[in-house]
Image: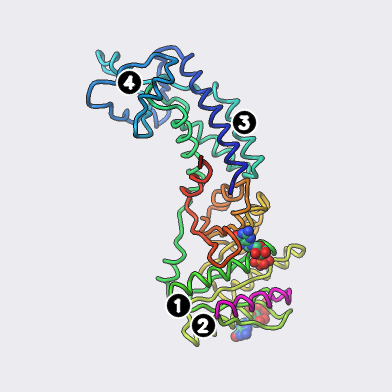
Amino acid sequence: MFKSLRDRLSSFKDKLSRKVEEEMEAAPEGAPAKETGPEQQSPVAAAPAGPAPPPVRPGGRAARRASRRATRGGEVRAAAPAAEGEVAFTDSIMGKMLRENKLDDLLQDLETILLESDVALPVADEIKEELKRELVGRRIRRDVDLEDFVEEALREAIRKVLAVEPVDLDAYVESHPKPVVLMFVGVNGTGKTTTIARIAHRLKKRGLSVVLAAGDTFRAGAIEQVEVHGERLGLKVIKHQAGADPAAVAYDAVEHARARSKDVVLIDTAGRMQTNINLMDEMKKIKRIARPDLVIFVGDALAGNDAVEQARAFEAAVGIDMAILTKIDADAKGGAALSIAHAVGRPIAFVGVGQGYDDLQTFDPDWMVDRLFAG
Ligand code: GDP
Ligand code: GDP
């Protein structure tokens, strides 16, 4: 999972920490802190209450490592003006500061790595800017391990682009008036039908009754596929003939759920690409008639930027509430997973991590960041 991006981030991190080390050693002692920007005005992180740790001579990287603290994040923001008499003390606990122009080339390298990993351009830019904010103008305490410091800055930059208000689909379904209607949209072959079956399986395990609507009436094969899943999972499938109005299928499924007090309706929809405008009209009509509580976009992580573009197109046509990304188990680049939430402003609820019914995992930005920096 994410192997190529992970490897590239790892060598980038090494380069960046070497550069940061060089810059710190080259910087004149006592360079003034950057003066503008709200962050710099925030109070300095609390200095240790006891005596300051012994200063480590520049170049004493091994010594710094040896005295590395158990806690991370030992860096401190640029100093507030020190009161007279405090200067020596402050200097002994503060390292030097990073200047922006020294990092430009490396930030450009990061952008290239991200773009080549299928990260959408605005998202790559945002990560770069966040990293700059994390690093530039910061004083780094001398006893802090630079690799850890740089990794934490990178993690934070990536975490920020993944941070869209999270969703808890299980909690939503459980707390909402029944039947809860979920409409799934996305392009053919992305794993939409498999995803619907997995969600059905998940909800059924939680004690909820589920009805499937075979709403891709454009392909007879799609109706059969939903029926196969319905049989395997022991679920009622509402279907019409191939070519029937999908809005009618969805409507019938909702009516069935109401009449039989079923808890959840999962609506499959068509995803043909060649007739995009008709497809979007069809989605709008299903939405108008079936009135889903949530529209869920299913995208294929392997499609990279295309998955992001598809999510944007469905968002523009019908509005989506969340995304599910499939095939993340086979994805080396990670670009779609990094980009979708930020690009569309909707969270990733789940990721597909294999071919089985249980291979669906709730998505957590920290989980993603941990995968990207797993040793
Ligand atoms: P649909 O056309 O969008 O309904 O796509 P399907 O549900 O038929 O899935 C297309 C293919 O992708 C099938 O072979 C699935 O087994 C496979 N697939 C779906 N989700 C995943 C996943 O999370 N990981 C992997 N490796 N394969 C998946
Ligand atoms: P139009 O088809 O563009 O005129 O859109 P409408 O808003 O009139 O949607 C009507 C469509 O939704 C019909 O073609 C039906 O397929 C479906 N529909 C609406 N009401 C019902 C209903 O009571 N039962 C069923 N089965 N389908 C319905």
Crowd class of label 1 (few under 14; some 14 to 19; many from 20; radius 10 Å) = some
Instruction: State how the image is colored.
Output: rainbow
Left/right of residue 200 with respect to residue 60 in the rendered view:
right
Q: Is residue 117 above or below residue 317?
A: above
Which residue was labeled with disc 1? 178
Depth-wise, is mark 1 or mark 3 nearer the camera?
3
Calculate the distance from the C-alpha at mark 4 to the C-alpha at mark 3: 32 Å
Q: Is residue 224 magenta?
A: yes
Mark 2 or 1, nearer chain start = 1
Mark 1 or 3, nearer chain start = 3
SS for dot 3: helix
Whether residue 187 appears in this view of the structure is: no
Q: In this picture, which residue range is highlighted in magenta? A: 217-234
Crowd class of label 4 (few under 14; some 14 to 19; many from 20; radius 10 Å) = many
Left/right of residue 152 with respect to residue 82 in the rendered view:
right
SS for dot 2: helix
Calculate the distance from the C-alpha at mark 1 to the C-alpha at mark 4: 60 Å
Please give the label number shown on residue 257.
2
Query: Where on the picture, by quarter, is residue 125?
Result: top right
Residue 26: x, y in percent? Answer: 49, 14
Which residue was labeled with disc 4? 93
Q: Is residue 90 above or below residue 126?
A: above
Mark 2 or 4, nearer chain start = 4
Q: What amino acid is labelled 4 in the image?
A: Ile
Q: What amino acid is labelled 2 in the image?
A: Ala
Residue 322: x, y in percent? Answer: 53, 60
Calculate the distance from the C-alpha at mark 2 to the C-alpha at mark 4: 66 Å
